[in-house]
Amino acid sequence: MTDLRKKIKILIVDDIPEARENLKKLLQFEPDFDVIATASTGREGLDLARDLVPNIVLMDINMPDMDGIAAANELRRSMPAMAVIMMSVQGEAEYIRRAMAAGAKDFLTKPTPAEELYATVRRVYEIQEQTFRNITINTDEGAGKKSLAADGRETHVIVVYSPQGGAGKTTVATNMAAALMREGTKVLLVDCDLQFGDVSIFLNLKPQATIVDLIKNVDDLDMDLVENVLVTHDSGLRVLCAPHRPADADLVPKDRIPTLIEKLKGRFDYIVVDIPTALDDLALALFDMAARIMLVVNPTLPAVRNTLAVMELLDSFEYPQEKTVFVINRYTADLEKAGITLKIAAIESKMRRQALTIIPMDEKRVLYSVNRGVSVIARDRNQSPAKELVALADTLRTNLSPQLEEQDQTSANQAPKSRFGRLFGG
Ligand SMILES: Nc1ncnc2c1ncn2[C@@H]1O[C@H](COP(=O)(O)OP(=O)(O)O)[C@@H](O)[C@H]1O
Ligand SMILES: [Mg+2]
């Protein structure tokens, strides 16, 4: 159940100390506001926003280092569920236009009368909640059942698999799913590792309900139940978490999972499924319904051998050529050069396809993210390995939903060159 009295978490970003203090004092009078931090530069604001995940960022425009417009732009890309309200002494149309273009949800001229400030924060928060959380609480209005496929979206299921434990399936699944998120796109990540599912740890989610609660009612699903069971990540990504304890895996009849996913189609643009290493009936059923089977392989001999065996099995099912794709994870150029790990070209030739992306080995960045429960891509998207994970999502989007891609040409232009283009001549 969602706590209706949840406070609105606010971050203030302004380079002038008095401006920060005044704003903070004003906001502190209101019981539903919680000023969780203040920052004095755009860069600092960005870092705090990523670490503390406020609901609302009150952002000054003119600041040294990174200005408010650039910071808002960056936030829109990496954390679309966070709402920026731009503040400036200048209230001219040009300023407002630039703020809106950077994705700001509203604009306030400084100094702002208290009532206007309060009303704006509450209004923006409410709209943002509705857009991203889409939470239906069991109130009187919410009691009527909604048809599951009411959105009528074309849903692409992407199953992430590797026969090798620790290959990076969950790392790829969580980051790719978060990178697929953007305004207007709905993404669901399903953790099908019923015994040791760790998606909730990777994304620092504290699920009250899990797949156990949904599978029980799979024959009689309604959207209220689904909304209450799914958890929302800060990126706006919806997540269906694995059972809390390994023993609870027995409460989930595996043969019902494909039906459950089938029923959730139509509500999301993408459903990303993270599955364990077992190549069992569940895996095969999920492969059947997938638009893409994404194999994660490390550049080592056993990993490549086993992945190749899986690829051959999949090819024997006569799936379309483009359905089975693979990514190389934990790549180190030095080790390749020294002949210690397999050469990329050799792996690609064995797989008879090119890797969609090559994710470098980076203990520091990946481990840091995992241990703090933030996605790798929530930090700097232009740096490896975030860059490769974002590129992977962009490649899939271009291939699976060209119409969605057209709506967001700007971000596509910024994405590193897709390897998919070379693959299928797109
Ligand atoms: N590219 C990488 N560089 C460094 N460490 C990685 C990389 N990819 C994954 N890891 C680490 O390897 C471990 C296993 O990854 P995980 O995604 O859980 O694998 P799987 O889901 O296939 O078992 C995690 O601790 C993760 O931090
Ligand atoms: Mg895993």
Image (tube, rainbow, N blue to C red):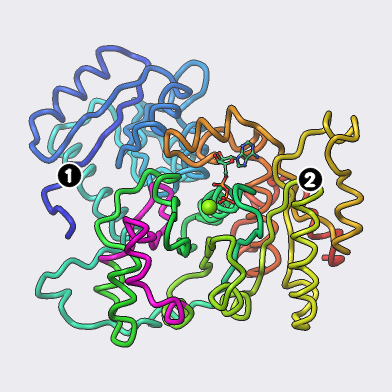
Residue marked by disc 1: 119
Where is residue 186? Give x, y as percent.
Answer: 46, 64
- At 45% from the left and 19% from the top, the residue drawn is 63
**Is residue 15 shown above or below 151?**
above
Of residues 342 and 53, the one nearer the viewer is: 342
- Quarter residue 79 falls in: top left
- Quarter residue 421 falls in: bottom right
Of residues 209 and 77, the one nearer the viewer is: 209
**Taking 347 as reference, is 379 left or right?**
left
- At 29% from the left and 78% from the top, the residue drawn is 216
| Residue occupying the far top of the picture | 17
Where is residue 97? Give x, y as percent.
Answer: 46, 42
**Taking 130 as reference, is 4 left or right?**
left
- At 52% from the left and 44% from the top, the residue drawn is 77
Of residues 93 and 209, the one nearer the viewer is: 209
**Taking 299 as reference, is 148 left or right?**
left
- At 65% from the left and 54% from the top, the residue drawn is 164
Residue marked by disc 2: 300
Q: Counting other residues with Cα less than 10 Å from the Cα at mark 2, is it few (<14), some (14-19), or many (20 or more)?
A: some
**Is residue 320 shown above or below 393?**
below
Tag 1: amino acid: Ala
Tell us which disc is closer to us: 2 or 1: 2
Quadrant of the frame with the C terminus: bottom right
**Segment tinted magenta in the rendering:** 228-257
| Mark number displayed over residue 258 | none
